[in-house]
Amino acid sequence: MKAREITEVGVLCAIAAVLGYIEALLPPFVPVSGFKIGLANIAVMFTLYRFGKKQAFFVMLVKVLITSLWFSGLNAFIYSLFGGIFSWLAMVDATKLKMSKVGVGMSGGVFHNIGQIVAACIVLNTKTALYFAPLLLPLGLVSGAFVGVVVRLLIKYTEKI
Amino acid sequence: MKIRDIPIILLTFVLAVIAYFATLAENADKVKVSADGAVIGEYSLDKDKTVDINGTNVLVIKDGKAFMQEADCPDKLCIKQGTIDANGGSIICLPNKVVVESKSGADAVSR
């Protein structure tokens, strides 16, 4: 890794953590613990396009560690980690399938929520968490599309830097 | 948006519909309360009752409806999740790992 890349990935980790923090401050707009718009996914997806999947995974992991251990406690860690890994995998696969940036964002958003539901099913040892899926999955589509649009703009304006 | 994005949209709605039918309860007449994976008890929706769940949450059953009245967690999301009635539903408190799910008597036998 070049020094420039190390620096940029470090800055992106910090941005991801701050976006996660801002999100934790917003009042939850869905009465389901753990549902997030996925603002921090903007940084993860941007890293995926600018550097690659390894760097994006690293940014995701740092974001999960900082936001869940710092702001919401160990309990949220497993939900956050499952959401992060699922959405990273989905975004990597979506880019391989040559989806547009909005499509990649939507994949990340939907699978982030799938990961959190899977984590809840494991932690709570019940399939009851599936009850929220009909609500959470389409919401992931919407929030993911938002992330995709933001990343598309970011890439457009940072191409020359 | 491109044509290639359509699969993820279709997949989302297919999964959402499957999850909807997988959790659909028919003629729910009981609620099962569990905390941290252990079953605390099953209560009929027909009888008014107040259930203390490990001192962290209070579930109230009234007029055929069950709802969470109190929770010691900061976000109180389980209270906002509303009521369980004959049409089924569930209340989940993630911080305290409390799950309240609807059940029907006939269903329990067939399973």
Image (spheres, coloured by chain):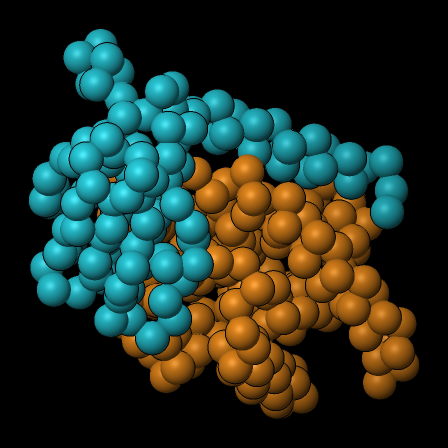
Chain colours: A orange, B cyan
- Is residue B6 something that shows in the picture? yes
User: For the point 59% across and 72% down, which residue is it?
Assistant: A40
Q: In the rendered image, is residue A2 in sight?
A: no
Q: Quadrant of the C terminus of chain B?
A: top left
**Residue B23 position within the rendered picture, expressed as x and y whole percent measured from the top left:** 41, 29
Q: Residue at x 78, y 53 (%)?
A: A102
**Which of these two is toward me, A124 or A16?**
A124
Q: Is residue B91 above or below residue B78?
A: above
Front-most of residues A88 and A32: A32
Task: Name the quadrant containing residue A34.
Answer: bottom left
Residue B44 appears left or right of A54: left
Question: Vertical placement of A121 versus B97: above or below?
Answer: above
Is B42 on the left or on the right of A72, as rendered?
left
x and y percent of residue A155 in the render?
82, 71
Classify A7 as above or below A97: below
- Asked where in the image residue B101 lies, by quadrant, the reply is top left
B49 on left or right of A93: left
Residue at 74% in and 55% down: A145
Number of numbered discs visible in the structure rendering: 0
Q: With A72 as the anchor, is B37 left or right in this view?
A: left
